[in-house]
Every structure is written in structure tokens, then in C-alpha cells.
Amino acid sequence: MHGPISLSSGDELSVGVPARGVRTYLAVRGGFDVPPVLGSRSTDLLAGLGPKLLRSGMRLAVGDDAAELPCVDVAPVTAIPEEIVLRVLPGPRDDWFTPAALRALASQPYEVTTDSNRVGIRLSGPTLERAVTRELPSEGTVCGAVQVPASGQPVLFLADHPVTGGYPVIAVVWEPDICLAAQARPGQRLRFRIVPWPGPGPGPGPAATVT
């Protein structure tokens, strides 16, 4: 794992279930030869853009966009912990919630439900109570946004996320931690840790986190 493998014609590569996390990534030298859509060769689950979803028995051609061979043995990859901790920035609609809601978000764990995919992760845990109950006009969101629907159970948006759809976003996961969120498997617990809004320059390191 996390390193280049040389294969000869006729070799077979078998990818099993990862011991930690839920996703395994496979790249080939030369790229996959599928038509790009809006500059991407990935499939958007929500919009239906891009190539067809992979199915058993499908064949993918290898492209000829081959660069130099990798010069590393193993890529540096963040280890996936048993209990994932995600740093979050409050807002942009944290003022739509009671003060207790933000405290609950950061003080108790949530469990990843089976109703999760590349669009987002539905979480089960403490209910986040609203202070403002009216519907919010749809707003654009970013990957890592933590939206709270009427149930009070948060949804963590991932790569194929939509707009808000009328529900407020209480916090946003710090960008370097999104890779950990994407590896959260059903039944796994995760926690949120609030970090302060940064000024100019790089974001907070572990020493800058607050509870």
C-alpha cells in the first residue's frame, strides 16, 4: 500500500478490504483513458457527470499521458486512527443554533451511519438544536461543510456535495482533515474539535486547537 508497483502484461492486481478506512485509491501510469468532462475524469454521483460508474467486468483503457517513473518507495500518508478527530471552523451559520449546540458538536462523539457516500456522511449522535427555525435560502457550500437538517443530526458534505437546500451549516471541517473524513466507515465514531478562525497565513496546527 501507498507505493508504486511494477506489473507485466498478464499480471493481476487484487485489492482487498482495507484494515482501516473505507476507500482505496488506485492510479496507473498514463492515466485512465476516458473522456474528460469539465476537466475531470471522475464521476459526480449527484449530478451524474463524467464517465459511467464502475461495474464488475468493465474494462478501462490506460492512457498515454505517462510521465517519469515515481522516485519514491512509499508515499507519506496520514494514518487513519480508530476514532477520527476532525478540526472544524464555526459557521457560517452557527448563529442559527443555540450556544449549547456548538458545545454538543465539539464535546460528544458521532457515529457514521450506513447512509453515507461521496455526497456526504450522515451522522448519528447528539441533536443540534436550532435558535432560528425558519428556512434558509439555498447557499453554496464547500467540501467539509457540516449541515444540520430538521432532524438535528449533522451531515458532513464530501466531494459530490450539493448546495444547502434550506438548512444551515454550523461548521466547516478544516481542509487538511477532509481526507480523514472521507475514510470514515459506517459504525466508526468521530469527534469534532473547534479551532479559531485564522488570520492571514497558514491554518492552525495541533497546538492551536481549542475545545
Image: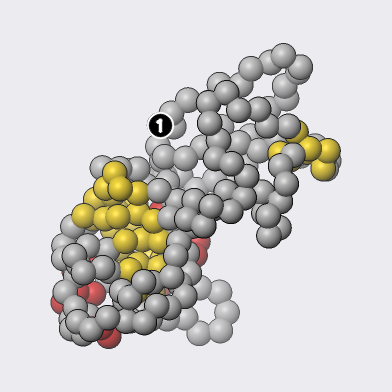
- The disc labelled 1 sits on which kind of residue? Ala
Density class for disc 1 (Cα within 10 Å; few <14, some 14-19, many ≥20) is few
Residue 210 at x, y percent in the picture: 32, 73
Compared with 179, 114 (above or below) is above
The residue lying toward the viewer, choosing from 143 and 69, is: 143
Residue 66 in which image quadrant: top right
Would residue 125 be seen by someone viewing this image from the given angle?
yes
- 127 to the left or right of 135: left
Would residue 209 be seen by someone viewing this image from the given angle?
no
The residue lying toward the viewer, choosing from 9 and 7, is: 9
- 21 to the left or right of 105: right
Residue 103 at x, y percent in the picture: 20, 73
Check disc 1 and report the residue beneath it. Answer: 19
Identified at 27% across, 81% down, the residue is 135
* Number of dots carrying numbers: 1
Compared with 44, 130 (above or below) is below
The residue lying toward the viewer, choosing from 88 and 140, is: 140
Identified at 16% across, 74% down, the residue is 129
Residue 121 at x, y percent in the picture: 35, 54
Compared with 141, 1 (above or below) is above
- 154 to the left or right of 127: right
Secondary structure, mark 1, is: loop
Residue 123 at x, y percent in the picture: 26, 55
Quadrant of the drawing holding the N terminus: top right
- 14 to the left or right of 114: right
Identified at 53% across, 31% down, the residue is 55
Task: Name the residue at the top extreme.
Answer: 10
Please, which colouring scheme is shown? secondary structure
Identified at 36% across, 61% down, the residue is 156
Quadrant of the drawing holding the C terminus: bottom left
